[in-house]
Amino acid sequence: MSMIRITTTDDAEPILKIYAPYIENTSYTFETEVPSIDAFRERISSCLQNWPWLVCEIDGVIAGYAYGSRHRERVAYQWSVESSVYVHDHYQGMGVARALYTALIDILKLQGFRNLYAVINLPNDKSVSFHEKSGFEYFATYKNVGYKLGRWKNVGWWQLQLNEYSLEPKPPAKFSEIKTKETEGIFEISGSLLKLK
């Protein structure tokens, strides 16, 4: 059985098992120290107040996860959000990232966000291809913006417009205020995109 669902704090440990190798062995994330389980639980709980954090579960195992997060602090930026997605090596090529992003994007639209940004450490052809197939458009590179694993790294920015740029927009709804009924159909549709072997 497979499903896309909302993350809970009980998922912290299996999610961290997916994320830790990216911290320790790659510069795909600029995080440099693996957080504790308790710190990661708090991170999930805090995120879920405002933005979706989703997992893909296959036969009881978390295969990947995706979430939205604040773009910048100032109030005028509140309609913009960033996204992240990570998939366990054993579940690559099964449509996990696509299923997660389909649900994530639909929920962020429902919340009323206008811009979704993907921040990709370069080079990362796989992530660039995935995001462009998902409708994101490249618009900038921050050169030598971070230093990790003995190298200065470039970061590329991709953007996806989620909703129209209406005048006098209402503030985006908090994820904690989105009704479960409104997300059930989203999870069902996105889960159907998985290509299970």
Image (spheres, rainbow, N blue to C red):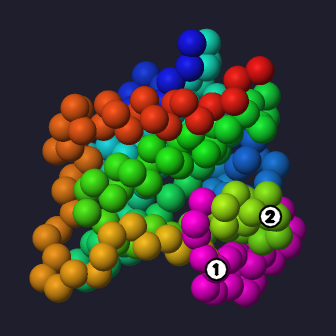
Residue 138 badge: 1
Residue 185 at what x, y percent from top left? 34, 34
Residue 104 placement, left or right of 149: left
Task: Report the Cα–Cα distance between label 1 and label 2.
Answer: 13 Å
Front disc: 1 or 2? 1
Which disc is residue 124 wearing? Answer: 2
- As shown in the figure, which amino acid type bears the numbered disc 2? Asn
| 190 versus 47 height, above or below | above
Q: Quadrant of the N terminus?
A: top right
Q: Amino acid at mark 1?
A: Tyr
Q: Which is nearer the N-term, disc 1 or disc 2? A: 2
**Residue 37 can be seen, yes or no:** no
Q: Quadrant of the C terminus?
A: top right
- In this rendering, is residue 28 above or below 40? below
Q: Dot 2: within a 10 Å radius of its alpha carbon, few (fewer than 14), some, or many (20 or more) residues?
A: few
Pointer 1 local density, CA inside 10 Å: few below 14, some 14–19, many at least 20: some
42 w.r.t. 170: above or below: above
